[in-house]
Amino acid sequence: MKATIYDVAREAGVSIATVSNVVNGKGKLSKQKRDHILKIMEELEYRPSMIAAALTGKKTYTIGLLVPDISNPFFAEIARAVEEQGHHRGYSVIICSTDNQDGRAERYLDLLEQKRVDGIIIGTGIENTEILKRLLAKSIPVAMIAREFSSEPVHTVVVDDFIGGMHAAQHLLELGHTSFGILSESKKVSSSRERVRGLKQALKDEGLSVSDENLMICDYKMEDGKRKALELFQQVDRPSALFCCNDMLAVGALQAAKELGIQIPQDLSIVSFDNTILASVTDPPLTSIAQPMEYMGKLVVDLLIQELEEEQTVKQRIVLPPELVVRQSTSEVRK
Amino acid sequence: MKATIYDVAREAGVSIATVSNVVNGKGKLSKQKRDHILKIMEELEYRPSMIAAALTGKKTYTIGLLVPDISNPFFAEIARAVEEQGHHRGYSVIICSTDNQDGRAERYLDLLEQKRVDGIIIGTGIENTEILKRLLAKSIPVAMIAREFSSEPVHTVVVDDFIGGMHAAQHLLELGHTSFGILSESKKVSSSRERVRGLKQALKDEGLSVSDENLMICDYKMEDGKRKALELFQQVDRPSALFCCNDMLAVGALQAAKELGIQIPQDLSIVSFDNTILASVTDPPLTSIAQPMEYMGKLVVDLLIQELEEEQTVKQRIVLPPELVVRQSTSEVRK
DNA sequence: TTGAAAGCGCTAACAA
DNA sequence: TTGTTAGCGCTTTCAA
């Protein structure tokens, strides 16, 4: 059976309080006695139960991470950064892939609450704002990453999606494009919404626009990007430039283009968003708006831990600048 | 403050035992009383503490997943499958990226033990077998995925790496190649070792071999694959075919080739392993030996849960067949 | 069918 | 400096 604090105490001839003290580095006791107890713990392979500790009021040192899909490279990189910084600060992370479904998110949130996690990082869109409001009302620390929730103050780390969308537009405009298509995620995903808004705004500034039939709403899956891209490409007036709200969709578009014999970038320029590993390895490599994923992950964790350790109440909203990375999926428009 | 079982009991005018029963669907009590209690729980937003439940002997319904790097697409897909099936069966998963460092793995293992996880899935190479032996000795359920640990019986789900290596060799041999290079991970990674062994065996069967200077040992990072590939490509007798132990390394090799102006597959054929999303989007797309990641993830979880719920002792070792997926990174050798 | 009470492994007063 | 003791929120006999 597993050794408990009682076993150690008995074996060492001290009280459990003393053992507890050496485990937590508290109290003053002779180095000799401490070493002795340490030795006993070693012998008994004693592993203090964080479960029991948590029950007495300590934290669980566990946080939850909600993302649409951990196998999506963007969220995989975010997760890695969160895990890294969490671990560094003494917290473990439980992953929760929501598939962008409110139902799943809600169930996961409930579960995390039951597991008494110390905080939750949300990187997934949640349509029903009630869910988030209820969560916040519970006074369990929450921080958002790569997603916004504007109707309530929450710690947030995002890239300026609107500016990112504008960057994409400006790049395409400089290349002479005048007709545009968009592969976006559902409007409930705040980041995609902003990106599209930024793109449209920049176009509008030049007296241009995107027609409704050229704006395709997709799932966040590659396959759906491909499907919707096929649809888009087969319309009568195919645009000369395509903006994809993330690399996954862009990869789908790339595949659709290949299937239809559309040459990238000669026949069609593509700008994507995120700049994950995918953007650098595709054929051709994708021009993409980069998000500093690693840094963002580190920041949310710090924000969250700051809140739950220092109970500070000023909610921060950190907005990082996106960066255009030009590769080979964009070129001057063919006259 | 959070509602406890006492609050519910008091409010409902029953004992905590009764509340406990309705939470767990045990005991027989009138539908009326049950509904009443359910209603109170709703009102109080009662969320039973799994921490407290775990302390009384119940499980934590949490498992740990050790992988080298969750941001690596292969492990991201494995993680997604593990999370999915875990969630389906009622378990949460804590991710642990070890960077292939024994030290990190050991610390994570200790932590998971303290958190009293119900079981651990290991998908990372651990050099020091003592660590694993100690873990197994503790009678905490363990299952391996995509990695082997042969000196002790453990539940294991792997692809037949040896056969996979042979497949790669056979494909290259059929294309007429006679000189080979290898980008492998460290020998401590059992899967890579077996893949290389399979490749070499198949070559040997044809009277061929790989010279030592053509076998490069890499980190599991893309950058290192590139670095080692550059080294390899700049040798006097550049091989006409390259086998990469995983997609990440192959992507690195692709980049090295591009940098040196080596055409793939005209100047060099590349076969990689894993068939992650990367293989399908690179330029050119990679011929790769596929592992059924999703299925493997589901299987380990089932194996692990079977062990920890039914305390069955016969350790299973499930070996799945790898599958050659031909894309455009391989072609007939140029005479 | 329901309740009282012991106990899970630990922390944190409070005493000694 | 060290020990005693009362919880933390739940499950689980055992009685009623």
Image: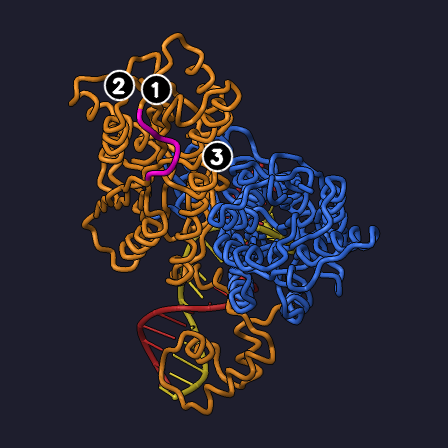
Chain colours: A orange, B blue, C red, D yellow
Q: Residue A219: x percent and y percent? A: 44, 25
Does label 2 or label 3 sit earlier along the sequence?
Answer: 2
Residue nearest the viewer, comparing A44 with A287 = A287
- The magenta stretch is A326-332
Mark 3, chain letter?
Answer: A
| Relative side of B235 to A296, left or right | right
Marks 2 and 1, how far apart in space?
A: 7 Å
Q: Which residue is mark 3?
A: A283
Residue nearest the viewer, comparing B256 with B61 = B256
**Crowd rating for badge 2 (residues with CA inside 10 Å; few <14, some 14–19, many 20+):** some
Q: Residue B65: x percent and y percent? A: 56, 53
Based on the displayed image, in which of its 4 quarters is residue A241 positioned?
A: top left
Q: Which residue is mark 2?
A: A178
Residue A210 is inside the magenta segment? no
- The quadrant in which the N terminus of chain A is found is bottom right
Looking at the image, can residue B26 be seen?
no
Amino acid found under the numbered disc labelled 3: Asp
Marks 2 and 3, how far apart in space?
A: 24 Å
